[in-house]
Amino acid sequence: MFKHNLFSDLESLDGSERFDDILKRQDVRIERIVSKGHVSDPGFWYEQAWDEWVLVVSGSAVLQFDKDSLKMVAGDHVLIPAFKRHRVKSTSLTEPTVWLAIHLQA
């Protein structure tokens, strides 16, 4: 058993968005994502084959779902159903946006 902290090592060495698996099992994956001004590439949409529950732990972001946008701040969470098109429209430029994502396999 090892203790870890969600707010440790937030910065990536090359300035890219950071993705860290916290727990990975056959039917579930818990991931920490750290964004700072990162957005989805133009024209890119996630459309994954599993449900994803996402919590903004700190910072802020805007998720885009087809024509609707959802502004999220620390404490906000949403369940994104499998095959629901979405993308990251914006994340905070002034502080890291720390996400906790739980991927649930069908």
Image (cartoon, grey):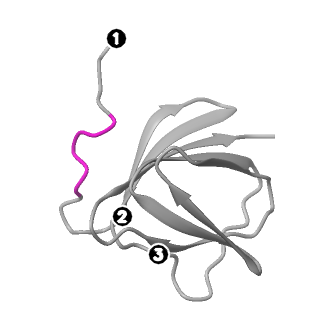
Residue type (three-letter) at the residue carrying disc 1: Met
Indicate left or right for 35 with 54 as reference.
left
| Residue designated by label 3 | 39
Among the 4 quarters of the image, the one containing residue 29:
top right
User: For numbered disc 3, what is the local secondary structure?
Assistant: loop
In the rendered image of this protein, does residue 45 appear above or below residue 51? below
Q: Position of residue 8 (x, y in %)?
A: 23, 39
Classify 10 Å Cα crowding around label 2: few (below 14), some (14-19), many (20 and above): some
Residue type (three-letter) at the residue carrying disc 3: Val
**Residue 17: which disc?**
2
In front: mark 2 or mark 3? 3
Residue at x 64% of width, y 34% of height: 28
- The numbered mark, 2 or 3, whose residue comes first in the sequence reads 2
The span from disc 2 to disc 3 (Cα, nearest Å) is 9 Å
| Residue designated by label 1 | 1
In the rendered image of this protein, does residue 48 appear above or below residue 20? below
Q: Position of residue 96 (x, y in %)?
A: 31, 58
Residue at x 49% of width, y 65% of height: 61
Q: Does the magenta stretch include residue 40?
A: no
Residue type (three-letter) at the residue carrying disc 2: Glu
The span from disc 3 to disc 1 (Cα, nearest Å) is 35 Å
| Quarter containing the N terminus | top left
Among the 4 quarters of the image, the one containing residue 48:
bottom right
Residue range highlighted in magenta: 6-11
User: For numbered disc 2, what is the local secondary structure?
Assistant: loop
In front: mark 2 or mark 1? 2
Q: Is residue 8 magenta?
A: yes
In the rendered image of this protein, does residue 73 appear above or below residue 103? below
Foreground pick, 89 / 20: 89
